[in-house]
Amino acid sequence: MTTKVALEQHVAAGSPELREVFGGVAAAAREIAKQIRLAGLSDALGAYGAVNVQGEQQQKLDVFANDVMIKWLGQVASVAACVSEEDEAPVVFANAGAKYIVIFDPLDGSSNIDVNVNVGTIFSVQELQGGDLNASILQQGTKQAAAGYVVYGPSTVMVMTTGTGVAAFTLDDSGEFIRSNDAMQMPEQGPYYSTNEANAASWPAAYREYLAMLLRGDLNGKTYSSRYIGSLVADFHRTLLKGGVFLYPPTDKAPKGKLRLLYEANPLAMLAEQANGAAVNGPERILELQPEQIHQRTALIVGSKREVEALQKAVLEAR
Ligand code: AFP
């Protein structure tokens, strides 16, 4: 009989302050999971009727998830501030001596909420440096103290790292996140590529040629199948477990990429690397990018080492 290890126990090995942060994220995730599960029975679905800092129509559940994350993290003594995809500026708490900043996408995959497809919460934890909040928020991804996501699907699962490997925790009926997977490793090469091919015509040529190379079976003779959910968390979760590559290249509409560096790309890149995978924006390693703005966007290619390295090589050679 394997011993049940709760999330807080697993994190306890590290810093007590970080354990508190995960306690806050877990409390918020419980509340968000319940709201999503019962959304069809209340008026929790649909548009909220406002536009967020990204210029996107907010869904009611986006706003709900954002409020709940800020509510629970505001009660954590070690959290100085929160940065959210939904808010223009950081939310600062009066927690004296607080050590961490939590940067998050409260509900990723909003376009899938109303159709009952997996959505998620993505978070990154940076340490406050010398009391300078803005500089601390804009640290490189290599400086992250922790990262993770919660996927709300058939089961609610939190995947996280504090820099010593990747573990997964499943929400049980008592409301506890219990470890269901430890020392997760991404396969060196996988059977899936995941991308919105509808954009392919507006990708730089090197990305189209790369996909054609994969489909010809030219990468170690491996054949590929396509999987794309349209919720980054869900597409990444499958890639972490099964291997392969997720790519959201630059497009004519989003020449700098669509996904956000601080609360989408950086946390998933840390998880990928901690699980023996890799993450680039094309030519560069995501975690070494120097952020300039809170809501800056980036191209993202993340997944198994073989596929990501082949893409990086193809893009650099095409220059
Ligand atoms: P939303 O949170 O606005 O639904 O965006 C989802 C997302 O940021 C990410 O989860 C997906 O991978 C990507 O956008 C989907 O984008 P396309 O709809 O352009 O494929």
Image (cartoon, rainbow, N blue to C red):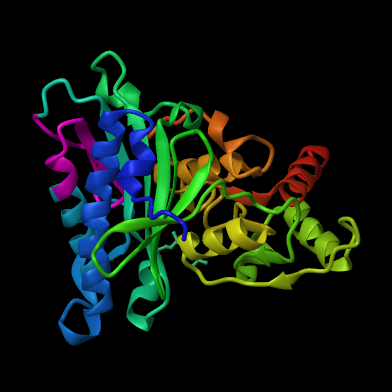
The part of the image, by quadrant, that contains residue 4 is bottom left
Q: Which residue is rendered at x = 83% and y = 39% of the image?
A: 317
The part of the image, by quadrant, that contains residue 30 is bottom left
Q: Can I make out residue 59 in this image? A: no
Does the magenta segment cover residue 76?
Answer: yes
What percent of the width, then of the height, locates residue 189?
76, 55
Q: Nearer the viewer, residue 52 or 9?
A: 9
Does the magenta segment cover residue 253?
Answer: no
Residue furthest left in the image: 94
Q: Which residue is rendered at x = 77% and y = 61% of the image?
A: 211
Q: Is residue 130 above or below residue 257?
A: above
Q: Which residue is rendered at x = 23% and y = 71% of the image?
A: 34
Residue 29 vs residue 273: left or right? Answer: left
The part of the image, by quadrant, that contains residue 199 is bottom right
Q: Nearer the viewer, residue 13 or 316?
A: 13
Q: Can I make out residue 283 in this image? A: yes
What percent of the width, then of the height, locates residue 306?
77, 48
Q: Write down the region rendered in magenta.
A: 72-94
